[in-house]
Image: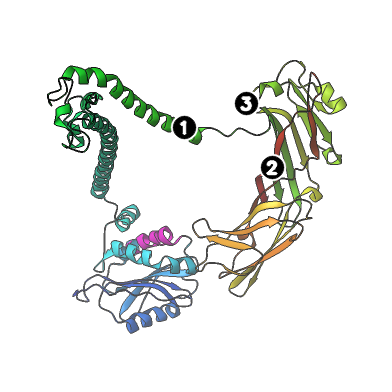
């Protein structure tokens, strides 16, 4: 719906004798205003009356681009389906008005593109802001189109510099936070280890007569050696035991008079024990950490000693009428060995009827006669092993065709215009011979003021306004849904070519070539070797133009 946009006019007390632009507007050829900007005090009824009278004053076949009435002058320039109009008083300089008109005519395609009715309505506000930069208080500003673009975007070098400085400060703060966090973690680890040593020292001192509460005063705690317990007295009971001061004082140290144990005895008896306790604790921590790293970082090896992978890439180019321009399929079979005792092997391959039309090529080290005669992939030197841990492409194939029956998925599109809307019907069809997974069809959407409306769809859809593409997510296509359709309604009269090219993407495990690995045997004893494998089909390009 086209509407007329008005902003509050700038306050002005300019008399009528001043050469001034009263208003700048974009109107249709029938007189309907699309954008209007007033630069003097003027009521809405008056500007609507002036713009409504303009098409009646414009004659056909005239070469000049201005027309006058008793009160105002219209200076105009035809665009694509619309008029760019300046309304000035009759005292204005026509040359300056024409220069102003030329400047505004450059701004319209700069902000509204093609300059038709729809694009001007979409870019109305940007165009009004541009008019304000070109005309101020009814007088033309000496500016160029790049300057107007810079002013409307408000690009400031000082602002960029401020943002750069602010960003550098934020990054510096983040670095400081990371360093502080590492320091805190390191302190926690050191405190944990230190607490373990202190506990060892406290236990040794408690048994020796100082009590558990004085363990941190042990002079050997910092060295990792707690003071050893004192030998029990002959009278039984340990002096100054772990229960505080409640032991028998007559059963003192080696001197027997109730004094503290001799330093020599404590150092001699406790050094070895304290050191072993510390090393044992450290060793326990180290074992746990290494075990966790081994569990987390160890790569998972395949269960089978050999893996066969078959991968095909398909490219399809079709016309919008459903005809096939070209189709190309390229495939590769790779072999990867994980164990040395399974490196000398031969792969038996069975070719079906669907192999007709494919060009097959083997690796230079593969015995071509053996493959063409017996269908066996083996090295020219039987005693030579395949590389360990490296995927080797042993067979490649390629096919180009224009046979429409080989196309896995056919997509048809019928756009039709009805009034001011366009109906786009899209349909897919397949023969159901292979399952297509993760199928997504991308349909270009022409520019329009409203997003497309999907009235019917088999599956899901998503509209990306930035790319201008509607994604039809069908998901899995198999024998149960060999056909599907979608109907799209566009709020514009779109051209048929605007909804093309349509692209498609999917993946599958059913290859186009009928090739199967029957068995893998050793070259020496012909003993069967276990193997695993996978097949996949990847779409490189799939377009309907």
Q: How far is the residue under mark 3 from the one under mark 2?
A: 21 Å
Q: Where is residue 141 shown, x and y percent of the image?
A: 26, 60
Determine which quarter of the picture holds residue 472: bottom right
Residue most extreme to the front: 235
- Crowd rating for badge 1 (residues with CA inside 10 Å; few <14, some 14–19, many 20+): few
Identify which residue is drawn at 77% across, 57% down: 479
Q: Nearer the viewer, mark 3 or mark 2?
A: 3
Q: Where is residue 393 shown, x and y percent of the image?
A: 69, 28
Q: Badges 3 and 1: C-beta atoms under 8 Å apart?
A: no
The question of residue 110 being in magenta is answered with yes
Report which residue position mark 1 lands on.
291
Above or below 151: residue 58: below
Going from N to C along the chain, the mark reached first, 3 or 1, is 1
Report which residue position mark 2 lands on.
536
Determine which quarter of the picture holds residue 57: bottom left
Magenta segment boundaries in residue numbering: 100-113
Above or below 405: residue 422: below
Q: Nearer the viewer, mark 3 or mark 1?
A: 1
Report which residue position mark 3 lands on.
389
Q: Name the one closer to the observer, 487 or 256.
A: 256
Q: Main secondary structure of the magenta part?
A: helix
For numbered disc 1, what is the local secondary structure?
helix
Q: Where is residue 345 shown, x and y percent of the image?
A: 75, 23
Q: Nearer the viewer, mark 2 or mark 1?
A: 1
Q: Is residue 17 left or right of residue 44?
A: left
The question of residue 523 being in magenta is answered with no
Identify which residue is drawn at 81% across, 20% down: 525
């Amino acid at each position: 719906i086209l509407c007329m946009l008005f902003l509050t006019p700038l306050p002005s007390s300019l008399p009528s004798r001043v050469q001034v632009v009263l208003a700048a507007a974009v109107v249709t050829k029938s007189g309907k205003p699309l954008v209007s900007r007033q630069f003097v005090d003027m009521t809405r009824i008056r500007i609507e009356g002036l713009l409504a009278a303009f098409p009646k004053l414009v004659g056909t076949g005239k070469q000049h681009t201005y027309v006058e009435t008793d009160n105002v002058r219209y200076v105009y320039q035809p665009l694509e389906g619309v008029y760019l109009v300046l309304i000035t008083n009759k005292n204005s300089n026509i040359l300056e008005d024409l220069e102003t008109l030329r400047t505004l005519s450059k701004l319209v395609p700069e902000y509204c593109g093609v300059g038709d009715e729809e694009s001007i309505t979409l870019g109305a506000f940007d165009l009004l802001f541009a008019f304000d930069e070109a005309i101020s208080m009814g007088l033309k500003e000496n500016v160029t189109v790049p300057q107007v673009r810079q002013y409307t975007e408000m690009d400031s070098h000082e602002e960029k510099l401020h943002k750069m400085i602010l960003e550098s400060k934020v990054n510096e703060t983040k670095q400081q936070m990371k360093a502080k966090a590492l320091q805190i973690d390191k302190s926690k680890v050191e405190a944990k280890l230190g607490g373990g040593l202190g506990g060892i020292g406290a236990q040794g001192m408690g048994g020796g007569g100082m009590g558990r509460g004085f363990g941190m005063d042990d002079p050997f705690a910092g060295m990792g050696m707690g003071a050893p317990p004192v030998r029990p007295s002959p009278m039984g009971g340990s002096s100054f035991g772990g229960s505080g001061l409640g032991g028998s004082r007559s059963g003192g140290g080696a001197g027997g008079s109730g004094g503290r144990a001799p330093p020599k005895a404590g150092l001699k008896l406790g050094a070895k024990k304290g050191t072993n306790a510390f090393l044992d604790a450290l060793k326990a921590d180290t074992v746990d950490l290494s075990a966790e790293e081994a569990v987390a970082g160890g790569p998972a090896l395949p269960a089978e000693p050999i893996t066969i992978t078959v991968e095909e890439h398909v490219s399809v180019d079709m016309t919008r009428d459903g005809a096939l321009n070209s189709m190309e399929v390229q495939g590769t079979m790779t072999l990867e060995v994980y164990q040395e005792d399974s490196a000398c092997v031969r792969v038996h391959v069975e070719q079906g009827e669907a192999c007709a039309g494919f060009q097959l090529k083997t690796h230079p080290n593969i015995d071509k006669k053996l493959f063409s005669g017996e269908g066996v992939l083996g090295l020219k030197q039987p005693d030579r092993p395949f590389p360990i841990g490296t995927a080797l492409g042993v067979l490649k194939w390629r096919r180009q065709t224009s046979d429409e029956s080989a196309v896995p998925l056919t997509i048809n599109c019928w756009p039709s215009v009805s009034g001011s809307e366009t109906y786009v019907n899209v349909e897919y069809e397949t023969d159901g011979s292979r399952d297509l997974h993760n199928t997504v069809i991308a349909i270009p959407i022409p520019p329009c003021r409203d997003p497309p409306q999907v009235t019917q769809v088999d599956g899901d859809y998503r509209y990306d306004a930035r790319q201008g593409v509607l994604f039809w997510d069908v998901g899995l296509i198999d024998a149960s849904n060999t056909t599907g359709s979608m109907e799209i309604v566009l709020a514009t009269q779109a051209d048929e070519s605007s909804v093309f090219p349509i692209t498609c993407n999917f993946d599958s495990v059913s290859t186009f070539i009928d090739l199967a690995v029957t068995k893998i045997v050793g070259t020496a004893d012909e003993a069967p070797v276990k193997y695993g494998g996978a097949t996949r089909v990847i779409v490189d390009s799939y377009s309907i133009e």
